[in-house]
Image (cartoon, coloured by chain):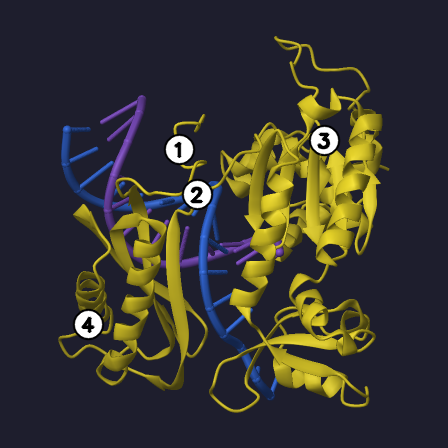
Chain colours: A yellow, B purple, C blue
Amino acid sequence: MLKRETQPSRNSLGASSPEQRIVLCIDFDYFFAQCEELRNPSLKGKPIVICVYSGRTPTSGAVSTANYIARKLGVKSGIPIVQAMKILKDQKGAAFIPMDHEYYETLSEEIMDSLRERADSFEQVSVDEAFLDITARSHSDYGNAEIIGKEIKEEIRERHGLACTIGIGPNKLVSKMAADSAKPDGFRIVRPNEVEQFLKDLPVGKLIGIGPKTEKTLNQNGIKTIGHLAVFPEDKLSELFGKNLGPLFRRMARGEDNDPVRERFPKQFSKIITLKENASTFNFRDDVEPIAKVLSVKLNQTGFKSKTIGIIVITPELKTKTRSKTLSYPTSSEEEIFSIASQLFQEAFGSQGEETLIARRIGVRVANFEEKTKRVGDETESLSKYIL
DNA sequence: AACAAGGGTTTAG
DNA sequence: TCATCTAAACCCTTGTT
């Protein structure tokens, strides 16, 4: 059914790529739950649910993640805690553990630091995921890459006691999808000549960056598999998803991705809380101050200052409203963040007798960073190695 | 034409 | 029925240089 015009032959345009990159993607399995197993081994073998309690009622909140025992029974990220409790009510020993992000971050940092040394260049994507460019140290040879990858996997098990999944491929996209296809506790290599076969029959929704909304639109246009997407007319895709994203999706479906593995620096910080009860501005003024403080501290600790300060309101219908303001100078001052956020809340909630906006959750965001001068103790810091 | 600001949406973990 | 939290990237519109 799917007509494939994509032949093994390369496209004929210009510089035959200096590309023999080999990229390794590492993903710690059910990371938060595994961290909990690490400090409390008696949890092993039981369903574990990592919870974010909102404080509205003793059980209200959402599931952050769960180990595979719980997942197999239907507990997924994002579902209400109550629902997870229902699913697991007959499971003896099921554990509902409040998320302890600081602890996970500490463990993550230790491991990331040891991974960083094993890469030509390194990119931490999240608390439990990273890319390693291993082109040079593998001499662009997948046999060598396999040895390196397996060493890393074992080292993490032995030194840190954690299971992980590793994917290896010619770029970040393919390495990540290779890892996704192999988890948990997996290892998979997809070589350049295997990319097309690897991708073509997977549902489009499996492509990184294609979520539920995009998948639905694609399906409605007859695109069910990544192979379909790879040969779909580019102008149609541009029409559907925009001039940038349309063509990008098509390239991704072909397994193409030139994005380099590079250190990431934060571009924004935000903090959002759930209010005990839905409220308007006049009632949650006291909640804004501690939020401003947290962000100010974080800016000062990391050495950033932000020019843009914004607020976020989640309505009872779970719609998101945002307002922001950009200053002519960067700041990290608690008072300043608080004062501007308060101002924005006033404006957003209608100061002159309009209908009052009601919030379920409120938050503050700082963005548009400018680096503060100097910082001691960090060598990797000088940010001049930033090639874009 | 290029860029910045601002608000919304989508994705991911 | 119940629905966390953080961060990034993109889209579109509007306004400025």
Depth check: give the residue in front, A42 or A62.
A42
Dot placed on the residue nearer the N-terminal end, 1 or 4: 4
Separation (CA) of disc 1 from disc 3: 40 Å
Q: Which residue is mark 1?
A: A383
Dot placed on the residue nearer the N-terminal end, 3 or 4: 3
Q: Which residue is mark 4?
A: A346
**Percent coordinates x, y for residue A348 in the rendering:** 24, 69
Q: Are dots 2 and 1 in contact, CB under 8 Å? A: yes
Dot placed on the residue nearer the N-terminal end, 1 or 3: 3
SS state under label 1: loop
Separation (CA) of disc 3 from disc 2: 35 Å
Separation (CA) of disc 2 from disc 1: 9 Å
Q: Which residue is mark 2?
A: A265
Labels 3 and 4 in the same subunit: yes
Residue type beneath disc 1:
Leu
**Which part of the image, by quadrant, shows the N terminus of chain A?**
top right
> Compared with residue A341, is residue A195 higher up or lower down, i.e. above or below?
above
- Residue A115: numbered disc: none
